[in-house]
Image: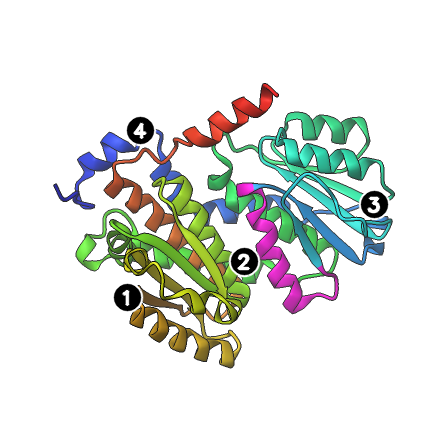
Amino acid sequence: MTVSLDDMAVRERLDQDGSYERIAGLPEQCQEAWGQSKDLRLPDDFREVDKLLVAGMGGSAIAGDFLQVLASQESRIPVTVVRGYDLPRWVDERTLVIVCSHSGNTEEILSCFDQALRLPAKKLAITTGGRVLELAQQNKVPSITYQYPNVPRDAFGHGLMRLLAVARALGMLSIDERRMAAAVQEMQALREAIAWHVPEAENDAKRVARSFENAIPFSVGAGYMAPAARRWRTQMNENPDVFAIWDELPELNHNLVVGLRHPADLLRSVRAVFLDHEGLNARVRLRYGLTIEMFERAGIGCERIVFPQADPLAAQLCAVHFGDLVSYYLAMLKGTRPMEVDNIDWLKDELAKR
């Protein structure tokens, strides 16, 4: 039986936790979080840092990826994202270690924080509370807190805006109120075209979700659009509970394209979406078209979405917002409750026993 994405009864049955409102409210979340953090002041000695490390997992780490690519364009201070238990050995007194944990109880990040506390590095915590905040307070580590009583992936705006505020305070990024307001307005304009009330026949996000209904979603990005492709994959994993993959250009042209022969049946079940922007390197954009041609010859269905926003930050945020809503609509098609993450909960319980 075909599920209608224009039937409110479907949404009422599957989304009793208000996931749609939270996902659709991302522009306002970004606006609110930026307003709360834009005037952030950091300790004077933070100005001495020449390296920045973001430690996070899952929804608390993805914001670090966005900061990393923006900083690579606008700052001489490199940003590294650590997803795991251990800090790299190069961390020193000129490194700012930012531990990001939505819950404040993520075990990998607690491990990184414990190591950072034993090093001369500058330290900063971003969290809603939990053990991370306790450790920060006990050790007089500056902390940035926010309140958001839902799953980390839905708090993307809170995490990203606070990281951007840190980068602004360090002089790494030129982000002012006008630039952020324009990005929020671009997201709001996009939402008007892909919101729930817009029929599927006129709604590109619903159409893309439908194309994923019986396929393996594969998101591809390049440069500053690569983190958006990663976000697409994680949202497809966590909202509709589907297996999904992501990769980035031009790297995949040096390996993945050779693997477009076997297994042929599996390849035909993949649906690829390429996230593009006019500001990307011209040679990379040429590779978009050639890669799509190769994919299609291998039986992989493809779509190229060019985000028209002039500012890369606005394009990134719009790509995230679009993908988040695609993942929500796919959850409706799959008959999945977006809030449920049973496998993650099971894994945490088992780890706690050992």
Query: Of 305 and 234, which appears nearest the observer?
Result: 234
Label 2: state its secondary structure.
helix
Asked whether disc 4 touches disc 3, contact meaning CB atoms under 8 Å apart, the reply is no
Report which residue position mark 4 lands on: 16
Residue designated by label 3: 121
First in sequence: mark 2 vs mark 3: 3
1 or 4: tag closer to the N-terminus: 4
Q: CA distance from mark 1 to mark 4?
A: 38 Å
Q: Of helix, strand and loop, which one carries label 4?
A: loop
Give whichever of discs 3 and 1 has the lower sequence position: 3
- 10 Å neighbourhood of mark 1: few (<14), some, or many (≥20)? some
Q: Are marks 2 and 3 in contact (CB under 8 Å)?
A: no
Q: CA distance from mark 2 to mark 3?
A: 30 Å
Q: Give the mark nearest the N terminus, 4 or 2.
A: 4
Amino acid marked by disc 4: Gln
- Residue underneath mark 1: 299
Our reading of the magenta stretch's main secondary structure is helix
Q: Residue furthest top?
A: 353
**Could you tell me residue 140's position as x and y percent?**
81, 32
- Residue at the spot 46% in from the left edge and 75% down from the top edge: 278
Tell me the amino acid under the disc marked 2. Met
C-alpha distance separating marks 4 and 3: 44 Å
Q: Which mark is residue 180?
A: 2
Depth check, front residue: 227 or 124: 227
Q: Position of residue 114 (x, y in %)?
A: 77, 33
Q: Is residue 231 above or below residue 70?
A: above
